[in-house]
Amino acid sequence: MLKLGYKIAPEQFPPSEMLQQVITAEKTGFESIDASDHFHPWSESGQACFIWSWLGAAAVSTQSIELGTGLTCPILRYNPAVIAQAAATVSSLAGGRTYLAVGTGEALNEYPVTLEWPEYDERQIRMIEAIGLIRELWTGQKVSFDGCYYRTKSAKLYTLPKNNIPIYISSLVPESAYVAGYYGDGLLTVGGESDTQKYEQILSEFEKGARDSGKSPENLPKAVELFVDYGADPEASLENFMKYWAGALIPALFVNKIYTPEMSAQNGKVVGPDTIRKNACFSENPEDHIKFVKKYIDLGFTHIYLHSAASDQIAFLETYGKNILPALKEMG
């Protein structure tokens, strides 16, 4: 069941470059991609394309690689009915190679265009309600929905998905993992912390939620994103992590009203190179990468999304695909 994926980076690269990256990822053996759905990047130096347009282009430019969001927030700047339509369209274009990962979002993407940033508990309730509406619309029936936050009247999708799109729910802490298991079809989290107990707790809560909702947790995807770099210039990739991604390593970003790239970058100034190294695998030795990823496979994760900040993503994909992916695939 092991699936090896590539975390593509719309926060760092323009969409045209990303299109070449996903084509290369497919050719080099990656089986899935995970694409952020951001309005703002983490840094003023970054990028932030409309990911649903790009996913449509990726769908018609590839043949086998799975496509999905990692993640989208379906509750504030979007009406969940729009997300249902967007995901269904990508599934139609991709012939069913689609999943949808959702979460409660960041103020960085939601507040600038809505001036709304409710407390976490309300955002979680909104997300649960949004998931229910999305699933109803995917049936192709006319949906009159009367929720606490969203309403529709005889709404119907006329272009339906080609697959039964699984919905992964993001969980960064054990406290939210039960909800992911109860309401979701899969889990998405971020790795890198040295203490594996946190991930054991996340997986345990996820599995408990799945069982309580009548699902078999052993059959559900459990995805984790991992920072890696494998190439000729790891120090340059480290600088890119500092430049484009440091803000994402501070938990406050996901809780507080940090809503501009400048605020995110300021928040990330406390992140130093040693912190990034502790959260990632920067090595030119394939065995180091195999050991790093194996730790998460042994914990019980079934979907691994590998993310490099290297400037030359094509070179990263080709060398990682040649020297590391084959050994990882043997573990699955």
Image (tube, rainbow, N blue to C red):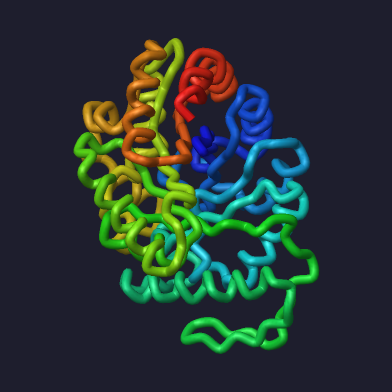
Front residue of 211 and 203: 211
Note whether 85 is above or below 91 in the view shown. below
Q: Position of residue 248 (x, y in %)?
A: 35, 45
Answer with the quarter of the image where residue 108 lies. Answer: bottom left
Residue at the image point whose x is 68% and y is 30% from the top: 23
Residue at 40 percent across and 75 percent down: it is: 125
Q: Residue 21 appears at what percent x and percent y?
A: 62, 30
Answer with the quarter of the image where residue 286 lies: top left
Q: Is residue 1 above or below residue 185?
A: above
Residue 83 percent coordinates (x, y): 61, 65
x 40%, y 59%: residue: 106
Splitting the image into 4 quarters, where does residue 214 fall?
Answer: bottom left
Left or right, residue 32 beside residue 216: right
Total count of labels: 0
| Relative height, residue 126 to residue 308 (above, below) | below
112 sits left or right of 317 in the view: left
* Residue that appears at 49% across and 62% down: 73
Q: Is residue 315 left or right of residue 294?
A: right
Q: Would residue 36 appear left or right of 57 to someone viewing this image?
A: left
Task: Pick the residue in front: 148 or 332.
Answer: 332
